[in-house]
Image (tube, helix red, strand yellow):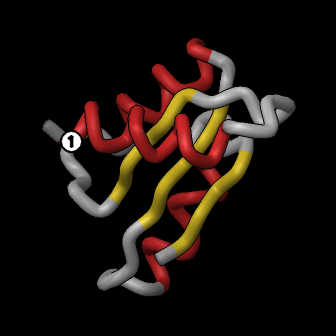
Amino acid sequence: MTDAVACGTGSITARPLARFPQATSTGVDLDPALLAIAEGTFASDERVSLVTADLKDPDWPGEAALRQCARSS
């Protein structure tokens, strides 16, 4: 599993996934425009989860996990 904090458009996330096809990745970012691009890039890739979270918020890890679960449902 790889984690991409401040994943942006996902261009860096794609690199380890290309090298390690069995890997999964969770990308975290706050910018809705960048996440929209990443969502388009990885729309058909079940290995990638994208989460909206504010990294300045000390509770972001827990909130990010809840948002990820909600998106997966």
Q: Is residue 63 above or below residue 20?
A: above
- Res 7 → quadrant: top right
In the image: residue 17, left or right of residue 10? left
In the image: residue 65, left or right of residue 48? right
Tag 1: amino acid = Ser
Q: How far across and how far down the image is residue 49, in percent?
A: 38, 48
Question: Which sits in the foreground, 38 or 29?
Answer: 29
Question: Which sits in the foreground, 47 or 40?
Answer: 47
Q: How far across and how far down the image is residue 2, in percent?
A: 55, 72
Residue drawn at (59%, 13%) of the image = 33
Q: How far across and how far down the image is residue 67, in percent?
A: 40, 33
- Res 3 → quadrant: bottom right
- Res 21 → quadrant: bottom left
In the image: residue 63, left or right of residue 17? right
Residue behind mark 1:
72
Disc 1 residue crowd, few under 14, some 14–19, many 20+, Cα 10 Å: few
Residue drawn at (47%, 77%) of the image = 1
